[in-house]
Image (spheres, grey):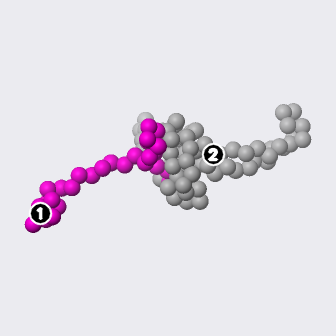
Amino acid sequence: MNRIKFHVKKGDNVEVISGNFKGSSGKILEVLPRKQRVLVEGVRIIKKHLRKSQDNPNGKIAEREGPIHISNVRKIDTEKGAEKKAKRKPTAKKQEKKAA
């Protein structure tokens, strides 16, 4: 009954902030909450060998996205295209120290 909540959801634009695919960005195709992983469009392309079948009479090597850990992605603001970060205001104590 408990639902696991994350900072990103399906359809969000994200940037990879760590790991082998650092710097790449894309749209989230799927969230896997039990494994804490996401599929990001165009990131971690893996090749899967498919055996012969009616659809593929000669077999096939299919390329698709692989999952990456959800902690390695950061949501980016779609309006500006920049990272979405909360701006912190200096506290009153810090302002007093600077004035003194």
Give above or below for 37 relative to 11.
Answer: below
Q: Is residue 97 above or below residue 29?
A: below
How many labels, in total? 2
Quadrant containing the N terminus is: top left
User: Residue 79: within the magenta?
Assistant: yes
The quarter of the image holding the C terminus is bottom left
Q: Disc 2 or disc 1, which is closer to the eye?
A: 1
Residue placed under numbered mark 2 in the picture: 42
Is residue 3 shown left or right of residue 38?
Answer: left
Upstream in the sequence, badge 2 or badge 1? 2
The vertical placement of 11 against 90, above or below, is above
Identify residue for label 1: 99
Q: Is residue 12 magenta?
A: no
Q: Residue at x 12, y 63 (%)?
A: 99
Q: Are marks 2 and 1 in contact (CB under 8 Å)?
A: no
Quick check: can you spot residue 33?
no
Residue drawn at x 55%, y 48% as measured from the top left: 25
SS class, disc 1:
helix
Question: Residue 92's spot in the image, x, y percent?
Answer: 14, 56
Q: Which residues are magenta?
A: 72-100
Within-10-Å neighbours for mark 1: few <14, some 14–19, many 20+: few
Q: Which mark, residue 85?
A: none
The amino acid sitting under disc 2 is: Gly
